[in-house]
Amino acid sequence: MSTRLKPRKAVHEFLVELQLELDAYTPNIIICGESPCESLSKHTLSCNVCPVETRNECMYHLRRRIRQRLSEEGCLATILDEDEGIDYASMDEKLILRKADVDLVVVVPTSEGSISELSSFAEDDEIRPKLRVLVPWEYHPFYGASESYVTSVYEELLAEYGHVYPFEVDDGVHPDPLDVVSTLVSVYKRRRLLELDRGGHNNS
């Protein structure tokens, strides 16, 4: 019996070690999307004061919830806003996102500005592999019938990387966006550990 228990104990120890590695690995994630409302920008109103219905429909508030969820799960999550010292958004944002320290770029393209951002990011060879796009399900190519330019961007990203995910914020049929990003980051951590492990073995 002891010979059967030894492998189980070893596997348990490996799992504990793996969990420690996962907990220690901290992805750097930048969240892009719709800008805050004018009241929030001018500090005349906070999100906590908004009615629950309005807050739940606010895509900027969704970005804040995503940041909080990712932070709770051991990520360094940042919301990228133009009013944070970014002088030339069309260039400065890409210069930031191209940095090797940035692991993932989560984009929620629900406004004209955020859709333009995504289109620009998708054309950059350094940024494109980092993109994880969350699309309201009714605009996702698998559900909608739109032939717009942005739909073709979604389709291109889907064909190349597959990282375009439908979501729904009101407990409907489609997944909650917080659960989507949580799953993505959990998988990403493991993929990165596999890559690092392979690199370590190759160098030995």
Image: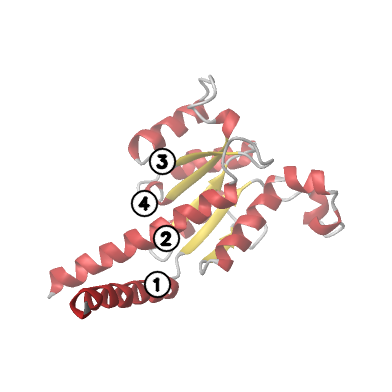
Name the residue: 83% across, 60% down: 43
Display colour scheme? secondary structure
Estimate the spatial distance between the alpha carbons at disc 1 and disc 4, rounded to whole Å: 30 Å
Pick the quarter of the image with the N terminus.
bottom left
Left or right: residue 20 versus residue 6 is right
Name the residue: 57% across, 37% down: 174
Name the residue: 65% across, 62% down: 84
- The x, y position of residue 5, in whole percent, is 25, 76
What secondary structure is marked by label 1? helix
Estimate the spatial distance between the alpha carbons at disc 3 and disc 2, rounded to whole Å: 18 Å
What secondary structure is marked by label 3? loop
Packing grade of label 1 (10 A; few <14, some 14-19, many >=20) is: few
Q: Amino acid at mark 3?
A: Glu
- Kindly identify which residue carries mark 3: 123
- Kindly identify which residue carries mark 4: 126
Near-viewer residue (108 or 193): 193
Q: Amino acid at mark 1?
A: Gln
Q: Is residue 180 above or below residue 157?
A: below
Report the disc number at residue 19.
Answer: 1
Q: Earlier in the sequence, mark 1 or mark 2?
A: 1
